[in-house]
Image (cartoon, rainbow, N blue to C red):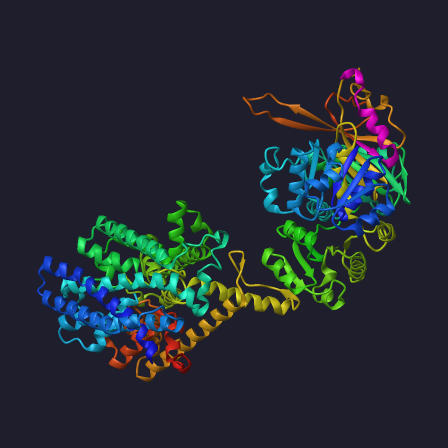
Amino acid sequence: MAWLLTIAPVLGLIAMAMSFTHLLPIGVSLALNDGIVQAWVLSMAVNFAAGAILWLTTRRHKRELSLREGILLVVTVWSGGALFASLPLLLTIPDISLTDAYFEAVSGLTATGATVLTGLDSLPASINVWRALLQWLGGMGVIVLVVAILPMLGVGGRQISKSEIPGPMKDDQLTPRVAQTAKGLWLIYAVLTLACALAYHAAGMMPLDALIHSFTTLSLGGFSSHDASLGYFNSAAVDVVAICFMIVAGINFATHFLVWRTKSLRPYAHDTEARYFVLVIVASIAGIAMLLYGSGVYPDLLTAIRYSAFNIISVGTTTGYSTADYNLWPVFAPLWILFLGTFLSCSGSTGGGIKMMRAVILYRQVYREIKSLAHPYAVTPVKVAGQVVADPIVFAVLGFFFVWIVLLVSMTLILGWTGLDAMTAFSAVVATLNNIGPGLHQVGPGTNFAILTDFQTWVCAFAMLLGRLELFALLVVFTPAFWRK
Amino acid sequence: MRIVILGAGQVGSSVAENLVSEANDITVVDTDPVRLRKLQDRFDLRTVVGNAGHPATLERAGARDADMILAVTQSDETNLVACKLAATMFNVPTKIARIRAADYLSHPEMFSPDYFSVDTVICPEQMLTDYIAKLIEFPESLQVLEFAGGSVSLVAVRAFHGGPLVGQELQTIRKHLPNLDTRVAAIFRHDSPIIPDATTVIEAGDEVFFIAATENIRGIMHELRRMDKPVKRVMIGGGGNIGRRLASAIEDRYDVKIIEYSRPGAEILAAELKTTLVLVGDVTDEDLLQAEHIGDMDVYCALTNDDETNIMSSLLAKRMGVRRVVALINRSSYVNLVQAGQIDIAISPAQATIGTLLAHVRHGDCVAVHSLRRGAAEALELVAHGDAKSSKVVGRRIEEIDLPKGASIGAIVRTHQLDSDGDKKTVERQVLIAHHDTIIEPDDHVIVFAINKRIVPKVEKLFQVSVGFL
């Protein structure tokens, strides 16, 4: 097991870096004088000390990481990072269990947005800042994970987002080096977050709320500092800002990067995924708004459009804000909204689910099977944006989808076995496995995950990690072959 | 004319064959001595073995004294280099290059004298593709040829029993078509030409060549035959250069299927084509054709590079019920064998593409030349220069012009320069169908139909201005 030591110094460095992120809640705590500065300082010290010890004791083992070590590193960063991140919650929130604190931290780092906490409005401000910051950092990690790291590992047909597909701009690699690409993407992420915060403030939010919500909007996380989520503001202007930035964050950041680099909007037009993304959103809004208006949920069409647009985009992009309890809408609407969350976001965005690219490939593959029945002699490659998708990638996507379905069903069954009703169990798994946030029924937007037992909470936390690490990266760690020499 | 032809492939050989017979001094350059020997055995020409892109080879081929260089090797790059060398080292006045890569063709500025010095770029595959695409667009026609930038078309159709004009005198066309002006340029009956006059009667089975403004073609065709229903489904046999180009040119308009023999080739095709259904298999495989419902196809095009395969596959397709078959046939003996039999149209690639080249070799100001009926007849677009004194045609009525027997004037395209606003000149083309009293004006483009190739030099001479004009 000596090879495990090679990732330890990297983990140590990451833990030390993470300790510095405590400076933001410490600053907020001092400025607003919410009385929990000591807890923050303690947590920061523990983080730093643990990281430093790990780094100092193992740094002589540092060398280039292999594929296997890379996977293990990613898994450890997300699952172990959540452990450290839950420390401040344990220290400051009275009567919170380790289970709940860990769930909340995982929900933060995976940018899911499911919460077990109630009375968010009365929590110390620095705690809410910390929850939002976790999502923002999680989103940052995801961008690098999906744009730079997973393509190298080739997880679940992920290589598709690298160089196989960008269509007419095939040779336009982002940058030759991963580190450089990451820096460029983070810059865009940070600039968009700043723009989002300013827009929220302009739309009427207090500065602290604007900061918190801009963090959770760009990361498509969905934590809010209010129990009523964005519905608390009850402002059309806030809704519009949120809608715009959720759509931006739901598109591949590599495309944003190209737009920024080429100083033209053409990359958006060439991004097949983005086209389907917008198309599905528009069609869904039209359909659901008509349904809500027709069934009398909202008295006028404009209100129906406003609420359906916000909640469709929020759940579809796997953010998880809500401005209405869509649980109470006609049953088609909440189910469709939840279904959108499983595939709508583009690959390379901060969203969860199986991603639009995989959905497109799956759809094309099904079409190909049907076509080859009618034309046994035909050669029908799967094409996306005019480019042929190689068969190994199609198989990887099929495999990914199969595992996704298996996990969805088996975890729903496990939750059902522990006593949850079918709709709650199913929607809780969908909402966590796809990093959406709120589910339906007992875990719907009007309530939260606090009703779950400890065991059920752990299942959901595991589902969130699975979803964020694209299933395979986490599952492979549980196979004997991974640990064999 | 002294002409150097680079490349003795299909294009080079057929060009050489055509030009030799027109009293030109031809030198053919190729890297393959066997090919050159074959050529030399058959024709009276000189051959040089060597790389056409090397100055020494060009020197040996006599580029220094050449009037024209024709770079038609397989490689675009060799052709480009040869043209540049011919321009800078040997001062060859006319340089024609065959370029196939679409990427080169989309940057016409690279052919200017400052860069590769190519005067005329030809792409035989593209010409052939356009030619076949026209036949699919007008499924009733045997041949569709365009003149004067596409404003005039010459169309060959076979008259069938039951067509409104069959069994009638030509002068009745006016009554049938009061608004559409057309002229029958020639009729071929049992393979022998008839120069039509007003009283000629069209019989079933005649091959009728008529000339008209392009926009009127459909209406006129309507009168000559019962109209077939428009083409919807096309099957292409052979996914080579021409099959691929044709499929991508027509896949937006028709429902296209293409059969390719090799799987790797088919995969490349499938990647490149958007809506075309790509099939792997043998074009003579009955099961494959049956499975793809060949009987429901409107047109089947056999475009492999093997004559025998094309013929067999076309015959099979015809027997299985396809409405119309088009086959690509290189050997002229085969063309005569199959045309007008089971196979509706046999296309000889060389004949379909030679026209552009011939136009440059001809005397006088010849804009376009099209071979008809496998090279037996010819249609030319000539520019009438000079004035009533220096020219034998300008300022005269058509009936006064001393055309050689077998030649007839089909149409005249007159260019009007409209009032120029600033620098931009608006040009309007007027198509005049020739009648006995039409008067030819200076700079008119005159479309002449010659039923026999031998009289072409006389026609050209007629259009040359006398020395006094210079």
> In the rendered view, does A170 fall on the left or right side of B68?
left
Q: Nearer the viewer, residue A99 or A452?
A: A99
Figure quadrant of residue B151: top right
Q: Position of residue A360 (x, y in %)?
A: 48, 63
Q: Nearer the viewer, residue A71 or B314?
A: A71
Q: Nearer the viewer, residue B311 or A342?
A: B311
> In the rendered view, does B171 fall on the left or right side of A357?
right
Q: Is residue A163 above or below residue A475?
A: above
Count of labels shown? 0
Q: Is residue B140 visible to us here? A: no
The quadrant of the picture occupied by the C terminus of chain A is bottom left
| Residue range (magenta) | B448-470
Q: Is residue B336 above or below residue B470?
A: below
Q: Position of residue B87 (x, y in %)?
A: 66, 34
The quadrant of the picture occupied by the N terminus of chain A is bottom left
> In the rendered view, does B298 fall on the left or right side of B202?
left
Q: Main secondary structure of the magenta part?
A: helix
